[in-house]
Image (cartoon, helix red, strand yellow):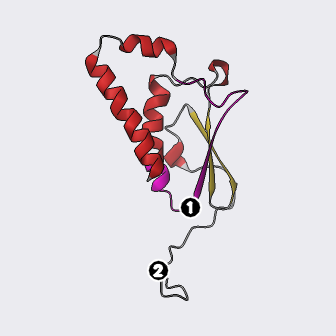
Amino acid sequence: MQGLTGISLRRVPDVTDNSPDDRYAAYTHLRFERPGDGVLLVTLDDPDRLNATGADMHLQLSRVFRTIDDDPSVRAVVVTGAGRAFSAGGDLDWIAEQVGDYAQTIRVMKEAGDIVRTMID
């Protein structure tokens, strides 16, 4: 579709409810809502542990922004935490498991980079 300025505009599908589609079903440590047109609310969902990031949540965070980028209905993302904390940071037990395991540490560092890069993209 051409806009008045000659710039191509992407059609955004109408979202009639605030529930996410199936593309987000695999993210078990994250909750998704659509509070407004074009807005996706992503909630870190482990309030009993103050949303501390363990192995599964970390992996999911490293992938979720690519999934969001492929969702044409999303124009803005808000990230929050369930309960009384956004996130306590890394799960200390999970971090301790990585000590001395070079391969696991490299994998986790790659995931951390993916989180930042895909969030920016």
**Which residue occupies 42% across, 47% down?**
118
Q: Secondary structure at mark 1?
A: loop
Membership of 86 in magenta stretch: yes
* Image depth: mark 1 or mark 2 in front: 2
The three-letter amino acid code for the residue at tag 1 is Ser
Q: Secondary structure at mark 2?
A: loop
- Which residue is the site of mark 2? 8
- Which residue is the site of mark 1? 73
In the rendered image, residue 59, in percent from the top left (x then y), is placed at 43, 32
Membership of 117 in magenta stretch: no
Q: Residues within 10 Å of mark 1 (few under 14, many from 20)?
A: some
The stretch of residues the image draws in magenta is 66-89
Q: Name the disc covering residue 53, or none.
A: none
Q: Is residue 27 above or below residue 1?
A: above
**Which residue occupies 49% across, 48% down?**
23
Tag 1 and tag 2, C-beta contact below 8 Å: no
Alpha carbon distance from label 1 to label 2: 16 Å
- Extreme residue in the right direction: 84
- The earlier-in-sequence mark between 1 and 2 is 2
